[in-house]
């Protein structure tokens, strides 16, 4: 491997030349000529590896078990065979996961393209993105009977109460304010935002969804359909990546989550015009009722109001990769809450022209 090909970030991740050589040998890719660490992923570690046979994407699997990875990669292979825009996994002696040392690895051909933030998409691209998600859901339903267990007709899930959310916010507030060795700038900012979150929750006591069971339809979903896992080329989605979170959810939940992540949520606001285009593209491909969409959007708002997953990563797991998402999430929550009705209406009223 050329020294220029191994970035400082790759060195910091402590994955050596020998490990990547072993991966390429297991997948019969040939000798590594160049390898570049890809910093965009939040959970797994990924490289762009060039050998005499071509260029490939290599992933070191951290998110989920290796058996889950094998199942997910079998699904991806079926989706690729069905014509869905996904990179078909390569096999090492018939296995899509190569276990080398303490880690598992998978590999696919390299798909050229760019990761585009949803706010950078034009309206037709936003509509195309909705169509792509609808196609993914339809395709998963078609192949699911062979590779996946049947999806239930309903999906119960506990709704966090305002009291429980306030107690959790108070716990993290105390934790941030009492760090050993003194609080950091991050801790101080967390305390300030948690004061505001507690006030916001208290202002909406009694507004939680009244039923623990979200409205159907329920089905197998990608689970993290957002710009970091989408490659664009020539104005279209060239590949849907990273199927680690493949599982059963309400389809409305994935529609709502994708739209809020894609169209400005990580910047603290939402481009409602693009949300409408995205939702219309989805509904043109796979119909879903107004009631199911409204229910999903409302539940997602409440989940965001009562959830502290980024702080769990920071304080409990000592994983700081998602710290920035806490602050953008707080800004978005304060933007979204007074506009709940407008946001729900945008999803529900979206129709194909």
Image (tube, grey):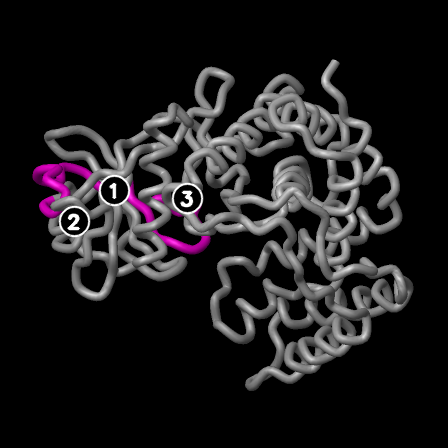
Residue drawn where x is 57% and y is 51% of the image: 152
Q: CA distance from mark 1 to mark 3?
A: 12 Å
Say which label, 1 or 3, has the lower sequence index.
Answer: 1
Q: Is 271 on the left-hand or right-hand side of 154?
A: right
Task: Specify which label sits upstream in the sequence, 2 or 1.
Answer: 2
Which stretch is magenta?
25-48
Residue for badge 3: 242
Label 2: element kind = helix
> How packed is label 3: few (under 14 Cα within 10 Å), some, or many (20 or more)?
many
Q: Quadrant of residue 218?
A: top right
* Mark nearer the viewer, 2 or 3: 3
Q: CA distance from mark 2 to mark 3?
A: 19 Å
Q: Which numbered disc covers residue 23?
A: 2
Residue 271 or residue 36, whichever sits in front: 271
- Quarter of the image that includes the N terminus: top left
x and y percentages locating residue 221 in the rendered image: 52, 43
Q: Secondary structure at mark 3?
A: loop
Tell me, yes or no, whether the two marked residues, 2 and 1, touch with CB atoms within 8 Å.
Answer: yes
Residue 105 at x, y percent in the picture: 25, 52
Name above or below for residue 197 compared with residue 182: above
What residue did someone put label 1 on? 107
Let me know if residue 313 appears in the view: yes
- Closest to the observer, 284 or 241: 284
């Amino acid at each position: 491997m050329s020294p220029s090909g191994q970035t400082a970030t790759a060195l910091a991740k402590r994955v050596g030349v020998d490990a990547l050589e072993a991966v390429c040998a297991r997948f019969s890719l040939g000798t590594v000529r160049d390898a570049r660490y890809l910093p965009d992923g939040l959970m797994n570690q990924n490289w762009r590896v060039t050998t005499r046979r071509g260029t490939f994407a290599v992933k070191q699997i951290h998110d989920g078990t290796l058996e889950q990875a094998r199942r997910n990669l079998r699904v991806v292979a079926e989706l690729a065979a069905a014509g869905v825009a996904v990179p078909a996994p390569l096999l090492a002696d018939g296995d899509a996961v190569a276990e080398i040392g303490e880690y598992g690895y998978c590999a696919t051909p390299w798909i050229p393209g760019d990761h585009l933030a949803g706010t950078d998409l034009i309206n037709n691209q936003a509509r195309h993105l909705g169509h792509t998600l609808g196609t993914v859901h339809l395709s998963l339903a078609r192949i699911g009977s062979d590779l996946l267990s049947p999806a239930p007709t309903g999906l119960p899930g506990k709704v966090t109460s305002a009291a429980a959310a306030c107690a959790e916010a108070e716990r993290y507030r105390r934790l941030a304010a009492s760090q050993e060795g003194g609080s950091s700038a991050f801790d101080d900012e967390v305390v300030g935002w948690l004061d505001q979150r507690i006030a916001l929750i208290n202002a909406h006591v009694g507004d939680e969804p009244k039923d623990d069971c979200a409205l159907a339809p329920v089905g197998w979903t990608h689970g993290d359909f957002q710009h970091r896992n989408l490659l664009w080329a020539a104005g279209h989605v060239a590949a849907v990546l990273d199927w680690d979170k493949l599982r059963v959810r309400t389809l409305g939940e994935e529609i709502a989550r994708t739209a809020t992540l894609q169209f400005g949520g990580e910047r603290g606001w939402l481009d409602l015009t693009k949300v409408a285009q995205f939702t219309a593209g989805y509904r043109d491909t796979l119909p879903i009722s107004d009631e199911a969409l409204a229910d999903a959007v409302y539940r997602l708002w409440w989940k965001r109001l009562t959830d502290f997953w980024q702080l769990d990563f920071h304080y409990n797991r000592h994983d700081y990769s998602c710290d920035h998402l806490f602050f953008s999430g707080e800004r978005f929550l304060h933007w979204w809450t007074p506009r709940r009705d407008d946001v729900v209406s945008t999803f529900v009223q979206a129709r194909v022209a």
